[in-house]
Image: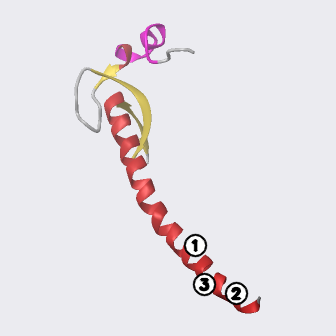
Amino acid sequence: MSKAHRGTGLRKTANHGRGECPICKTKGIKVLYEYDLDGKKVMICKFCKAHLKNKARLEKPAAAPADAAPAAEEAAAEAPAAEAQA
């Protein structure tokens, strides 16, 4: 498996992949990951990428149980109707 964020791949980029992260404002850090920020593609650091990914992961399950609850109610509503027909 290749290591795109180490060694030779970094030497080809400006400042060997180092700069200021637009999210956390840390200077001299590797900014290697593309991210869409306010409609612009920017390069962010590894730590901000992980933070954004974890934040999205935690928000996603919170919405899922709300969607599952109406399906359970519909199934419960259909069950008595099926028993009445039998």
Can residue 38 be seen?
no
The residue carrying mark 3 is: 77
Q: Which mark is residue 83?
A: 2
Q: The N terminus appears in which quarter of the rendering?
A: top right
Q: Residue 25 falls in which quadrant of the image?
A: top left
Q: What span is in magenta?
A: 5-15
Residue neighbourhood size for the residue with mark 3, other residues' Cα within 10 Å, grouped as few (<14), some (14–19), many (≥20): few
User: In this view of the protein, which residue sits in the foreground, 19 or 70?
Assistant: 70
Can residue 74 be seen?
yes
Q: Amino acid at mark 2?
A: Glu
User: In this view of the protein, which residue sits in the foreground, 51 or 23?
Assistant: 51
- Mark 2 vs 3, N-terminal side: 3
What is the secondary structure assignment of the residue under circle 1? Answer: helix
What is the secondary structure assignment of the residue under circle 3? Answer: helix
Q: What's the CA distance linking mark 2 and mark 1? A: 19 Å
User: In this view of the protein, which residue sits in the foreground, 9 or 49?
Assistant: 49
- Residue most extreme to the left: 26
